Amino acid sequence: MKSLAWLAGCLVALSLPANAGNPFGAAEVQDEELAQLRGRYVMPGRIIHFGVTMSSIWENSAGQTIGAGVTFQLDEQAQPSLHITQLTPQGEGQGSGGAVIPGNGQVVGGAGLTGVQGISQSVRSAGDFNDGLNNLEIVVTRGADTPTQAADAAPWSGQTGFTGAAGEVLVSTRNGGLQIQLDAGAQGNALQQIGGGNITQQANFSGSLNTARNLATLSVALRDLPLGQDLANCTLEQLRALRPGGY
């Protein structure tokens, strides 16, 4: 009996292709194959909310701030909404009243950063004691309520700009995406863009003692499965549909 088991094992091993020493090992999947798999593992009706939130804010050495936020939401009925928020309300963010340290630095180069396909984050400084942060989060929740808009958010009505003591900020659409462009004058500038095949977050300092924050969040809320529904069976049924494609 042991001889028969050993012989059967040898026959199975010899029947495997030469490059299949470990048939259960990990294999690299090409981008073309991944492109055909997108969305296959989310059941219809499972997504109850999809949203993109961006905010950019600048604070100079005198404590003066300027900034703006953009929120895009898509509910389960595929109804989009786009809102803009001024992050420095009128009469606030004027700082301590002290003088702003003059900025005389010069940030050069970097023109190719805006042409990167994918995610590009950069912080460049030609001054001293600056603080820059670029942050991107992807949040997936289950059974969560749809987020509500801020009370001071205004519906999108086209290109919108805000001006404050620290500079000016412009929210616009460009290259198939949303863009927040912040100009702090001689202190520097910041840029954030999402869409058109890339996500860009930049902070460029030409002065000193400045703080810049570029924050973005991609959020997806999934509906909880009904009691008794077998998630494994749902996944197997979707994998079954891939068989004609050769996967």
Image (cartoon, rainbow, N blue to C red):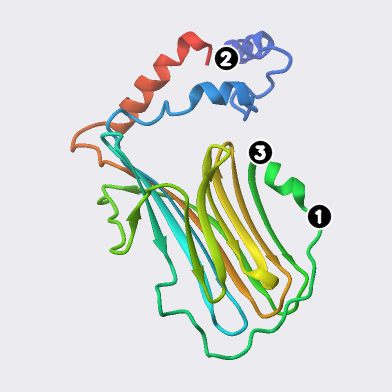
- Nearer the observer, disc 2 or disc 1? 1
Amino acid marked by disc 2: Ala
Q: Residue at x 69, y 84 (%)?
A: 101
Read off the residue under disc 1: 109
Query: Callout 2: few (<14), some (14-19), or many (20+) C-alpha neighbours within 10 Å?
Result: few
Q: Secondary structure at mark 2?
A: helix
- Image height of 240 relative to 97, above or below: above
Residue 62 has which mark?
Answer: none
Label 1 Cα crowd, 10 Å radius (few <14 / some 14-19 / many 20+): few
What is the quadrant of the N terminus in the image?
A: top right
Residue 2 percent across, percent down from the top left:
58, 16
Determine the residue located farthest toward the left in the rendered image.
Answer: 227
SS under mark 3 = loop
- Determine which residue is flagged by label 2: 5
Q: Is residue 23 left or right of residue 245?
A: right
**Looking at the image, which is closer to me, 72 or 156?**
156
Using the image as rendered, state which of residue 90 and residue 199 is in the foreground. 90
Q: Residue at x 68, y 73 (%)?
A: 187
Tell me the amino acid under the disc marked 1.
Gly
Percent coordinates x, y for residue 204 in the rendering: 69, 64
How far, Cα to Cα, is label 1 from label 3?
18 Å
Which tag is nearer the camera, tag 1 or tag 3?
1
Tally the numbered discs: 3
Quadrant location of residue 70? Answer: bottom left
Indicate which disc, 1 or 3, sits on the residue closer to the N terminus.
1
Q: Is residue 125 above or below residue 4?
A: below
